[in-house]
Structure formats: structure tokens, C-alpha cells
Image: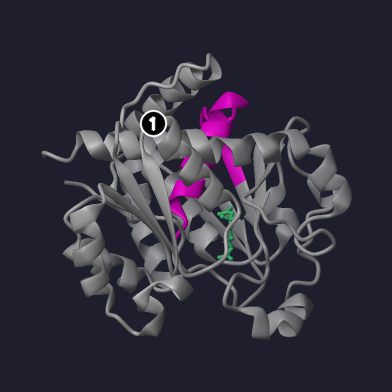
Amino acid sequence: MRHFLTLRDFTKGEILEIIDLARKIKEESLRREFIPYLNKQTLAMIFEKSSTRTRVSFEVGIYQLGGIGLFLSKNDLQLGRGEPMKDTARVISRMCDLVMIRTYDQKSLEEFANYSLVPVINGLTDTYHPVQLMADYLTMIEYNKANNPTVAYIGDGNNMANSWLMLASKLGFTLKIATPKGYEPDPQVVKDALNFAKESGAKIEFFNDPSQAIKDADVVTTDTWISMGQEAEKEKRIKDFRGFEINSKLMQLAKKDAIFLHCLPAYRGYEVSEEVFETHSKEIFDEAENRLHAQKGIMVWLDRKRSE
Ligand code: CP
Ligand code: NVA
């Protein structure tokens, strides 16, 4: 049985296999063919943090695959009153067929997975957001940006930056990350990514100047400067990230036909200007829709691996 906790655990071949499956299921569903790949299966969706896209895409996704989603917010679960993760895992995984969790610490997610009898999917932790990256890569393919691209990630070295490091280093493309000093991605993730890059041929570079990272990029991306759980640091972060807004002037340094991706929610006037956001809204909302298709691929793939 496999879990989907981080792209670190996946080979290039497996990532591409899931993407192919997602594309096939997307084509079927665009023809309104909803094949019950997960007939009568139940997906438990545990949320310790807020969500729009993750909740809707998983709930709609499992329904379209012939199953049902259970929305479980921390406040309504005994988890919120101190019941251990490992006990929650042992109960839920006896009744449900798949579990998705959005939580803070990657270690809590791993603990859940260790005690779970069914596949567990990471719906975002402080360290990684791997389902988002599958949707992002699917979008890159659809915009013909998956053939040896240069991706520029400008902003906070957070769960999205860490996840881009995993995707690039596994698939072997160029990733240029620009963060303010002190906001670099997790050093362990960087170390792992540089090791994977040796094998895949990925080129990974770090900058503190956004204009250097964005130069000639095919794909430009960013994320909020204030992730969930960091609200108390808002004022300091806004000061420290000055000069990191992706605006038209900065975007002009990327390739002429570069696409702009954002996992959303977006904060205009901070990590991205209103103008750049609206100019690239087609890509951004295709990316958001692709959460649905990519995650259907992930769920069906995990179901197929159940007996291995
Ligand atoms: N991108 C993303 O995961 O969005 P939500 O927080 O709305 O789920
Ligand atoms: N880095 C953001 C991503 C939200 C989808 C957060 O963790 O809040």
C-alpha cells in the first residue's frame, strides 16, 4: 500500500504515471463520462486548517469517481479535544477507504499514515503541498511548458517552495528560487533536492534578488507571504518581502510567452499585482480546476497500489 505524503517518496516514473492517469480521467470527465473507479468508496477529509480548493476538489472528485467524501473539521472531531492522531487514524481507517489530511506538522501526517490501514493523502502541511504540485505540473503540460522548462519561484521559502524543489529535482527541470534573506526553503528539503538533482539532471539555483531568478523563465510562480499559522508575523513579513511583488515590470524579464501560476488564495498588492494576476487569470484558474483532475488521478492510482 502507498501513501501520498510528499513527492520525495515518488520516482519520476510514478509521478508521470499519476499525471497520465489524471489526464485520461480528465478527458473522460470533460466528455461527461464519470467512470466509477472508486465505486462506493469513502474518502475521509480531515481539516485542521481552512480550505476552499482542497475541500471542494476532493469532495467533488471522490463523488465523480463513484464514492463519497466525509468533511471532518478538527473542531468537530475529538482530535480537537486531544484524542491522539494515532487513535484517530486507527478508527477512521477501519471505516473509510482513503484519507486526506490538511494539518500543520508533516510528522503528525506521517504518524497518521503509520497507523492507517488505508492510503493517506497530504492535503497540505507546513512543509509540503504535493497535490497542488501535481495540478501545477498538469497545467504546465497543457500550456506546453513541461519540456525542459525554467521555473522561477519568487517569494516565501514555504511549503510551496519546498514542493517545487521536490518536483523539479525528481523530474529534472530548472528551478530558480528567489526569497528574501532569512526566508529560504527548509535546509533539509534543499539538501534532498540537490541530491535528487544529481540523478535527474535538474538545475536548482537560489537568489535573494527576484529579477535574477525570473530572467528568461517559462513559468513564474509565487505564493502568499503569510501562510496559515503565520498570521502573527504579518507586519514583519510585509516589510521583509518588500520588492518581491510580481508586477508587470518584473514579469517583463521572464520569457515573452511565460505563464504565471498561483496556488491561491492570492493577495493582490503583496506577492502579485492585480495587473499580473488578471493578465494571467486563465492559467491560474485552469490550475485551480486541475486540482480536481490531478487528485482524481492520485486517488485512483493509490487504490490500484493497495494490494502491492
Ligand atoms: N491552493 C489551495 O490548497 O487552496 P485551499 O487552501 O483553498 O485549499
Ligand atoms: N503556503 C500557503 C498555501 C495555501 C494553499 C499556506 O500554507 O497557507
Considering depth in this image, is 151 or 290 the residue closer to the camera? 290
The quadrant of the rendered image in which ligand 2 is seen is bottom right
Residue drawn at x 43%, y 22% is: 34
Q: Single out the residue that lies furthest toward the top.
A: 31
Image: 29 above or below 84? above
Residue drawn at x 41%, y 35% is: 296
Q: Please provide the residue range marked out in magenta.
A: 128-151
Residue 101 image offset from top left, x and y in percent: 39, 60
Considering depth in this image, is 267 or 150 the residue closer to the camera? 267
Residue 210 is left or right of residue 300, and the answer is right
Say what amino acid the circle numbered 1 marks: Leu
Does residue 270 show up magenta in the picture? no
Q: Quadrant of the C terminus?
A: top left
Image: 307 above or below 144? below
Q: Is residue 147 visible?
A: yes
Image: 134 above or below 48? above
Which residue matches tag 1?
Answer: 65
